[in-house]
Each structure stands twice: as C-alpha cells, then as structure tokens.
Amino acid sequence: MVTKEQIIDGLHYIIDPTLKRSITELGLVRDIVVREETVSLTLVMHPESTGEHVTAPLNKEIHEALAKLGIAQPHIRYRTMTEKELADIASKQQPQATAEAQKASQPIKGHGAGLEKLSILHPDSGVSFIAIASGKGGVGKSTVTVNLAVALARQGKRVGLIDSDIYGFSVPDMMGIEERPDQIGDKIKPVERFGVKVMSMGFFVEDNSPIVWRGPMLGKMLRNFFSEVEWGELDYLLLDLPPGTGDIALDVHQMLPQSKEIIVTTPHATAAFVAARAGAMAIRTNHEILGVVENMAYYDNAASGERDYVFGRGGGGKLAETLHTELLAQFPLGAPDNHPAEPDYSPSVYKADSAIGRAYLELAHAVIARCGR
C-alpha cells in the first residue's frame, strides 16, 4: 500500500500557479488519508488560483502524478486559504526568496572547462536576454528571431535561442534542425546550428502532435528551459515569444525582469495597432524596448524593378513613435534563396552575403550597441 510520504514525494514537482513553488514544499497538501482502495487529500489554494482555468489543469497534473503511484481514482478536495494561512505563506516566501537569491549569486562549477559561473537567471550572469514579441501571429516574428540570433553569432557573440512559442513552435524547422538534444548527466545539451544554441518544445513532440497544455504546465516547461539546460557561457539569450500577451509572455516578464524586448510588426495599420499591446505590456513591467522591426515592409517586384507595398506603409514607424522607441529595421517580403541540396540548408536563415543577410547584420550591430556588449 502506498504511504503518505510516497504521495508527498510524488507531488513535489507540481507548482502552485500563483506562488510559483512546490505545493508540497509550501505544505498545501493536507488531510492525506490512505485506504486500501483509494486515497483522499485536500489541496489548499491561493485565492488567485481558484478559477476553473487554474484548477482544471492542476487537477489533471495531480491525477497523473498519483496514477504513477498506482492510485487510479483519488478523491481530491480544494479549498481556499484562510487569512492566517495567507500570512503564514507570505512569511515562508520571503526567506525562500532571499535564500534563492543568495544561492544564485554563489559561483558553481561549469561543465567541461571547470569555469565558475552564475545561474543564467541571475542579474549578474552577464547574459543579455532579448524577448522577441508581436501582437498577432503571421508577422514573421520567428523569422526575425532566428535571423537575428544567427547574425549575432556571425558577429562572434555566444548566442542561445529558446523557442518559447510552445503551441506554435517552428524554430527547429526554420533552422533546418533534424537532430534532438543530448542529455549529459542531469542536464540537457541544446542543439547547436549556425553557431546558435537552440531549445524548443519541438524537440520533445513526436510527429508534429498538438500541445494541449494550459497555463501552469507551460510555465513549468519554460522554467525547465532555463534550469535544466546546459547553456554554457552566453552573451545573448533570445526568446521567441508566442504572439499576444498570454501566459508565456507573463511568465517571461516575471522570471526575467532584466529582459529587453524587440517588437515585430508588419506595415499594416491593424498589425501595428495590435502590436502596441505587446509593447504596452513590456513598458508596464519595466522591460526596456530596444526597438521595432517592421517585417514584410515591401516586395521587390522583379518584373517592374519597383517596390510594391503589399501591406501598406508606415505601421512600423507609427508603432515605434507610440512606444517612444526606434524603428530598427525594415525587411522585405520574401524567403531565402536556399536549396535543399546545400550542406547547411535551412528554409529560413539568410546567407551572410545576401542583401537581407547583410540587413540582419546591421540589425545585430544595432542590438549590440543598445545592449552595450
């Protein structure tokens, strides 16, 4: 028969969506009763975690964890914290936050070369985090992210890239990555392509299957990309955010208060209007906006030799003005002239000596100048 200790151990990895810590570490799992045919328990919830959109995925996680222990039909009760419990939790959170900050500041031994380094999330780690955001999908945000990452690597920078668009991951395919990450000890080694270290949910999904996760599980995967991946020494870590201002974007703002952002839009007025929301979110959370990139700004018409402004004009400039920042670059509508027979083929990465490849190098120079490294 399963024991209470086994149940608590089996639930240790489940995170309270509001408090961002283990439900067992916080003592939120109560009244565990083990009988021959079933197990019952109570989960104490933070008042901000009581909505159905939170409890449903959390309930699913708990059932899955208990199923691994052979508990098929547990009886789980939920109740909201009392004021006293809230006060007790608050007193626990402060020492924990202080301890984690002290731990993060302690040098740890790096793999391989034995160099000492700080936690990648620590403000003094030396890593410049850049989130690439957009208000809506279909504006070429991932194309901009991938090519900016490669351009920074071509400038000799040590670059990582997290494909944090967990529902709509596309970076591995765009970069022509076919291999999967290796595991070294208890860490995952990212796949390196064009000098960029890459992590994506796409590496862990078979046959392009859909992702049906909800908020807490998304945040957990993103944290794993920071804590369980052996990034090594980095100058820049780029995050390809999902469009809009949903759960992942919120998690990034909470986990990376030092992150900077680039907002991607097309020239179309509606795309720029929607992108302003992503920019407003960055401003409200004190993320520095490095600038705006206008993608699909024009189309070079080979027949006429002129530029066609397929999606209109002025959206990127107007967005930059609204956000009190600069228009960093304008890229045309098109695709790289790459061929599958080439040894370094990728569908979306522009060659360094192409016109657009050189334009991305200019964008990289602008980013380096603004980040000061």
Image (spheres, rainbow, N blue to C red):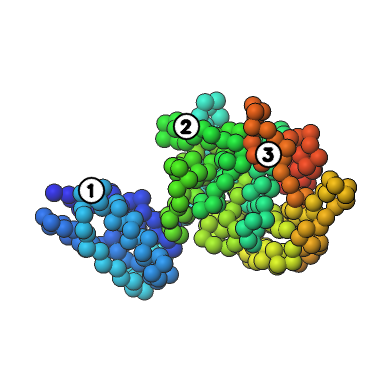
Q: Residue furthest right?
A: 305
Residue at 44% in and 42% down: 206
Sooner in the amino-acid sequence: mark 2 or mark 1: 1
The residue indicated by pointer 2 is 182
Q: Which residue is drawn at 57% across and 35% down?
A: 177
| Mark carried by residue 15 | none
Q: Which of 28 and 59 is in front in this view?
A: 59
Pick whichever, 56 or 207, lies toward us. 207
Alpha carbons under labels 2 and 1: distance apart: 28 Å
Comparing 152 with 135, the one in front is 135
What's under tag 1, amino acid-wise? Leu
Q: In which quarter of the image is residue 261?
A: bottom right
Q: Residue at x 85, y 52 (%)?
A: 307
Tell me the distance, in whole angstroms, between the alpha carbons under discs 3 and 1. Answer: 46 Å
As shown in the figure, which amino acid type bears the numbered disc 3? Val
Numbered disc in front, either 3 or 1: 3
Can you say whether 70 is above or below 229 in the image?
below
Question: Residue 285, percent across and down?
Answer: 62, 63
Dot in front, 2 or 3: 3
- The residues tagged by marks 2 and 3 sit, at their Cα atoms, a distance apart of 24 Å
> Residue 198: x, y in percent?
57, 39
Q: Is mark 1 on a helix, strand or loop?
A: loop
Q: Is mark 2 on a helix, strand or loop?
A: strand
Q: Quadrant of residue 281?
A: bottom right
Residue 349's label in the rendered image is 3
